């Protein structure tokens, strides 16, 4: 079918309108002589439309005799997941890291090494607990989870089995692992592919999901021109430097770190990362004495999950900028007019007035003279910054400085995943 | 996780408002129609109001619309008769489609967020800033509402309306003369997504959108993003499609900007204009490989 649009694909990272909003459907498929147990099929990865299957096979009255499991199977299943979670809860009490997470998996394997009873429930429990151990970005952990599936048993033997989602519960579980990887930006590798071929074969839905991920994810891995590494540093000074570098358009931008000990009068004991280029220094040096400069902030800038507050030293729009653009508009108007067109190419060049080109810091809503990120983002630290700027910009001490500060908040904020204890974290070198 | 809290029985035991929303969602056709059954709802269950039979008041409104719509028709014909289409396209030609410097343009755009359909708690607004630029701001919240149905949450979107001509007839944009989409923005370092909605006929293709990330620098400087149309990839209902094809530039219905980068917290994107650009050096047709794959891989 050429034109069909299926939702069981990789999400567009942004257009991920509420994924899988379908209510779960139960379906029973009789394949060969085996009665596949009812399973939960979410919208991803399901080639078979569950609603249709329900329509054909399991309408409400008939469900009774076709149901292979008891009526409270759902409840039991959930209890089993909760039961499996206790392994991780116990492990989390000892240590919350990769080693203890893998130790929990090893503990399961010690008991269920041969029969792997309840491995799907165990994997779902593991996926739920990943963020507590901080392993949701570890490829090796995902591989260890996929390794829990029994090998060869679930490889489909014919096209019908492939298309009817052979071992649906296990495949859906595997797809959920892969989707969790996708959300956390973990790109799978060839070894994981070989693992999946060993478990589900190279034609199963789970393997198709893997192939899609291998096609799309590396394509966008380094697409961002303002690159931020996947694991952002935790040191606030490093973060501040990274953010200032990323924000700077001017390549000559120079970042200076001041620690508050250097400056005795400062009330806050914090750091100040200040960014300024020679162009900006020249702009301050030539700034008219009668017009003020403004200190504005705190504005927000994001480095992946980390949000920082920055401040800007700004002045009004410069004369250079306005004359340049007025002149440009005039030129454009002249060239657009039919009256000025000529059939002789040489005629088109006309004398133009000499106009100074504005720097990249001059914009229509003001001129950026310097930017800074401080450890606490407090008003006091910002006033200290302006005083520090006076060392390199002597002209600044003669200019009226107006403070237009909106908020006083923590400089670095991290909103962690829901369910975590630290929902709002702030750093500051005290 | 799809396994946790999915039992419908449990949900219907909750407050009555939730029951209503559950029953409504139950009819949502999120699953694709694989059997080529007719999908009756153009918005896949997300329509805000149902079509009503014309009452007397409705008829009066229609009559009121007649004048302005006739005016539009007149303008269309005047433009047609002038025949002043641009034929010669030169390198560097650009056209601004939306410049967000007045209230009317900004109000003509639609703000959507997951909260609209009780599918999340994100907040968003699109307003006119102090320096006459559009500001798309709000707070993204990825906390999934505990109704047992929603799996993932957290998106905010601004979008232009479907382009229409007089008497509310669909009139897709024709951007065949251009090679790039041009956006002048000032972001906060987050990655947004540019969405181009297609005007396509069949119900299977109603949700076709071409998307590409809009990477922002963050900070006080304005940036101009120049995204080639060839790099946009096909997605439907938030999922990238297996079978890709290049965008038909004469069938474009609307443009939007989405934020759904899964980071909780405030966002702020200033938009100056959205325009089109012609780069004669751009020869790429479609950025993604179109090689043959086994038939079982593709739907």
Image (cartoon, rainbow, N blue to C red):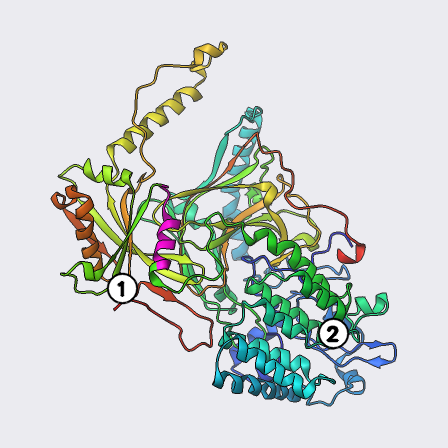
Res B5 visible: no
Camera-near label (1 vs 2) is 1
Q: The disc numbered 2 marks a residue on which chain?
A: A
For residue B70, side relative to residue A375 (left or right): right
Foreground pick, B94 / B11: B94
Question: Are dots 1 and 2 in contact, CB under 8 Å?
Answer: no
Report how many numbered discs are placed on residues in the image.
2
| Co-location on one chain, circles 1 and 2 | yes
Q: Which residues are magenta?
A: A238-251
Give the position of the C terminus of chain B as an image quadrant: bottom right
Q: Chain of mark 1?
A: A
Question: Which image quadrant for residue A126?
Answer: bottom right
Query: Is residue B6 a member of the stretch shown in magenta?
Result: no
Q: Earlier in the sequence, mark 1 or mark 2?
A: 2
Q: Is residue A240 magenta?
A: yes
Dot 2 falls on a residue whose secondary structure is helix
Q: Is residue B258 left or right of residue B126?
A: right
Percent x, y of residue B106: 42, 48
Q: Where does residue B257 sit, x and y in percent of width and height? A: 50, 51
Residue of label 1: A376
How many residues crowd around disc 1 within 10 Å: few (fewer than 14), some, or many (20 or more)? many
Q: Mark 2: few, some, or many residues within 10 Å (few <14, many ≥20)?
A: many
Frontmost residue, B113 versus A405: A405
Where is residue A233 drawn, in percent x and y?
41, 62
Classify mark 1: helix, strand or loop. loop
Which of the labelled discs sits on residue B22, or is there none? none
Reading the image, the residue beneath label 2 is: A168
């Amino acid at each position: 079918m050429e034109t069909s649009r299926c939702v069981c694909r990789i999400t567009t990272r942004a257009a991920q309108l509420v994924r899988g909003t379908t209510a779960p459907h139960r379906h029973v498929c009789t394949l060969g002589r085996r009665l596949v147990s009812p399973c939960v099929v979410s919208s991803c990865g399901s080639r078979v439309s569950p609603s249709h299957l329900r329509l054909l096979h399991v309408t409400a009255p008939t469900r009774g005799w076709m149901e292979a499991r008891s009526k409270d199977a759902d409840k039991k299943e959930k209890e089993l997941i909760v039961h499996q979670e206790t392994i991780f809860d116990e492990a989390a009490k000892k240590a919350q890291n990769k080693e203890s997470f893998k130790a929990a998996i090893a503990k399961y394997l010690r008991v269920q090494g041969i029969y792997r009873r309840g491995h799907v429930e165990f994997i779902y429990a593991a996926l739920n607990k990943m963020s507590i151990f901080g392993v949701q970005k570890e490829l090796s952990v995902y591989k260890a989870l996929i390794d829990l599936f029994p090998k060869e048993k679930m490889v489909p033997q014919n096209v019908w089995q492939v298309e009817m989602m052979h071992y649906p519960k296990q495949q859906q579980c595997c797809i959920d692992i892969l989707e969790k990887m996708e959300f956390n930006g973990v790109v799978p590798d060839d070894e994981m592919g070989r693992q999946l071929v060993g478990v589900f074969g190279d034609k199963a839905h789970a393997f198709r999901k893997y192939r899609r991920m291998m096609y799309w994810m590396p394509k966008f891995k380094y697409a961002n021109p303002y690159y931020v590494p996947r694991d952002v540093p935790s040191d606030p000074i490093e973060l501040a430097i990274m953010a200032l570098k990323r924000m700077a358009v001017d390549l000559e931008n120079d970042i200076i770190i001041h620690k508050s000990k250097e400056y005795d009068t400062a009330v806050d004991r914090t750091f100040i990362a200040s960014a300024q280029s020679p162009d900006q220094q020249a702009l301050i040096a030539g700034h008219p004495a009668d017009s003020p400069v403004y200190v504005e902030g705190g504005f927000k800038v994001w480095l992946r999950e980390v949000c920082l507050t920055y401040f800007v030293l700004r002045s009004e729009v410069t004369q250079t900028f306005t004359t340049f653009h007025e002149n440009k508009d005039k030129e454009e108007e002249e060239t657009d007019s039919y009256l000025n067109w000529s059939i002789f190419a040489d005629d088109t060049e006309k004398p133009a007035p000499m106009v100074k080109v504005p720097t990249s810091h001059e914009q229509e809503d003001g001129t950026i003279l310097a930017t800074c990120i401080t450890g606490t983002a407090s008003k006091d630290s910002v006033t200290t910054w302006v005083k520090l700027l006076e060392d390199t910009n002597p002209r600044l001490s003669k200019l009226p400085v107006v403070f237009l500060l909106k908020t006083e908040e923590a400089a670095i904020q991290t909103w962690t995943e829901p369910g975590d204890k630290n929902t709002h974290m702030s750093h500051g070198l005290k | 996780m799809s396994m946790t809290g999915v039992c419908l029985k449990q949900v219907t035991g909750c407050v009555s408002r939730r029951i209503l929303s559950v029953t409504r969602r139950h009819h949502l056709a999120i699953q694709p129609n694989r059997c080529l059954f007719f999908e009756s709802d153009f918005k896949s269950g997300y329509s805000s109001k149902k079509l009503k039979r014309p009452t007397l008041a409705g008829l009066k409104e229609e009559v009121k619309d007649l004048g302005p719509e006739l005016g539009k028709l007149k303008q269309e014909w005047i433009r047609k008769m002038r025949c002043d289409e641009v034929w010669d396209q030169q390198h560097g030609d650009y056209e601004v489609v939306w410049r967000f410097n007045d209230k009317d343009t900004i109000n003509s755009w639609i703000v959507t967020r997951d909260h609209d359909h009780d599918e999340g708690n994100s907040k968003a607004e699109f307003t006119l800033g102090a320096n006459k630029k559009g500001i798309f701001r709000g707070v993204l919240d990825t906390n999934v509402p505990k109704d047992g149905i929603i799996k993932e949450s957290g998106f905010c979107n601004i979008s232009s309306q479907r382009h229409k001509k007089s008497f509310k007839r669909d009139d897709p944009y024709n951007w065949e003369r251009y090679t790039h989409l041009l956006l002048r923005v000032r972001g906060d370092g987050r990655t947004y997504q540019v969405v181009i909605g297609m005007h396509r006929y069949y119900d299977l293709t109603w949700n076709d959108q071409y998307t590409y990330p809009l990477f922002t620098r963050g900070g006080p400087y304005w940036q101009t993003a120049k995204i080639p149309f060839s790099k946009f990839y096909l997605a439907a209902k938030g999922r990238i499609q297996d079978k890709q094809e290049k965008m038909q530039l004469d069938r474009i219905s609307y443009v939007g900007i989405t934020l759904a980068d899964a980071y909780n917290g405030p966002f702020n994107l200033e938009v100056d204009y959205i325009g089109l650009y012609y780069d004669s050096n751009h020869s790429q047709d479609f950025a993604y490989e179109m090689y043959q794959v086994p038939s079982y891989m593709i739907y």
